[in-house]
Image (cartoon, helix red, strand yellow):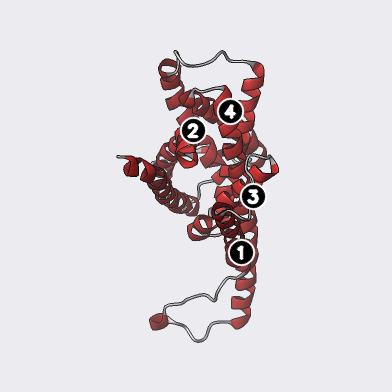
Amino acid sequence: MGSMYSFLPFAVMISLECFDVGLTTLSKAAFTRGMNHFVFVVYSNALAAALLIPFAFFIDRRKRPPLTWPMLGRFFVLALCGVTVMQNCVFTGVNYTSPILATAMANLIPAFTFILSIIFRLDKVNLRSSGSLAKVLGTLISVCGAMTVTLYKGPVIRNVWFLNYDLDDTHDTAQSTIAVKDWIIGSLFLAGASISWSTWNIMQVATLKKYPAELSITAFTTFFASIQSALLTSLTVRESAAWSLKWNIEFISISYSVWITVQCQSPYCVLTAIF
């Protein structure tokens, strides 16, 4: 029984990574069909908040501490770091690059979390300890891997059976330059998302100690995130047609995103990852 519980954190994190791959793939398909990624974040968080708030009100009513203005401010910052900034950076990066790169860049999250935990003195580095050496080595490998996939983009692989040998080399070179530029811009957005998510990890642990009502924290976070994202989208998206939702891959990806948001934003996942 003890060995099963010790394996549980790894199983949860691996499952979340698999679900995240599905989310980035579905969202990329929706963006390709013309859906705006800022609108995507608004709809997914608004729907998640609408589903979570009633459950949080009844389930956490006995263990929920009194709500104060400083705690509301903490929830607002949690929403800003863990949802609004993070998700908009992720989906902007996916829009510029690909789900494969987004999944690869997510490996920076443990590295940034470890660095931030040292900065805020939540963790110590003891080079004589094998555990600390493993963390430092893993951080270096993660950063080097992220730099490699960002700065190096291999040649385009074409179908050799239908290859047109009369292609304009100048056109190919121009398209390749644009693609590399988008690749780097998207990678920077994805790296910013990793930093934002790592900051959220640190803040979430501290928030749980002061407000041990997991579902309520998630409900407040998605509620504030929907408001923040709506304000951001109103400033960046001028076309009213962008707000229209089609009942195809767009609705499927948003529904899946709601489920992922509830799972990944839940402090249960943070506690599982820590312990």
Mark 3 neighbour density, 10 Å: few (under 14) some (14–19) many (20 or more): some
Query: Which residue is at the far left?
Result: 1
Mark 2 neighbour density, 10 Å: few (under 14) some (14–19) many (20 or more): many
Mark 1 neighbour density, 10 Å: few (under 14) some (14–19) many (20 or more): few
What is the secondary structure assignment of the residue under circle 1? Answer: helix
For label 3, the residue is: 125
The numbered dot on residue 207 is 4
Residue type, label 1: Cys
Circle 3 or circle 4, nearest the eye = 3
Image point (63%, 51%), residue name: 126
Circle 3 or circle 1, nearest the eye = 3
Q: Quadrant of residue 57?
A: top left
Residue type, label 4: Thr
Q: CA distance from mark 2 to mark 4?
A: 10 Å
What is the secondary structure assignment of the residue under circle 4? Answer: helix
Q: Does residue 149 show up? A: yes
Q: Earlier in the sequence, mark 3 or mark 1?
A: 3
Residue 50 placement, left or right of 227: left
Residue type, label 3: Val
Rendered location of residue 77, percent (x, y): 64, 31
Q: Is residue 10 above or below residue 50?
A: below
The numbered dot on residue 267 is 2
Residue 57 placement, left or right of 186: left
Circle 2 or circle 3, nearest the eye = 3
For label 1, the residue is: 144
Foreground residue, 156 or 86? 86
Foreground residue, 46 or 1? 1
Please report contact status of discs 2 and 4: CB closer than 8 Å, yes or no. Answer: yes
Q: Quadrant of residue 154?
A: bottom right
Image point (50%, 26%), residue name: 219
- Look at the image and tell me in which quarter the N terminus lies: top left
Residue type, label 2: Pro
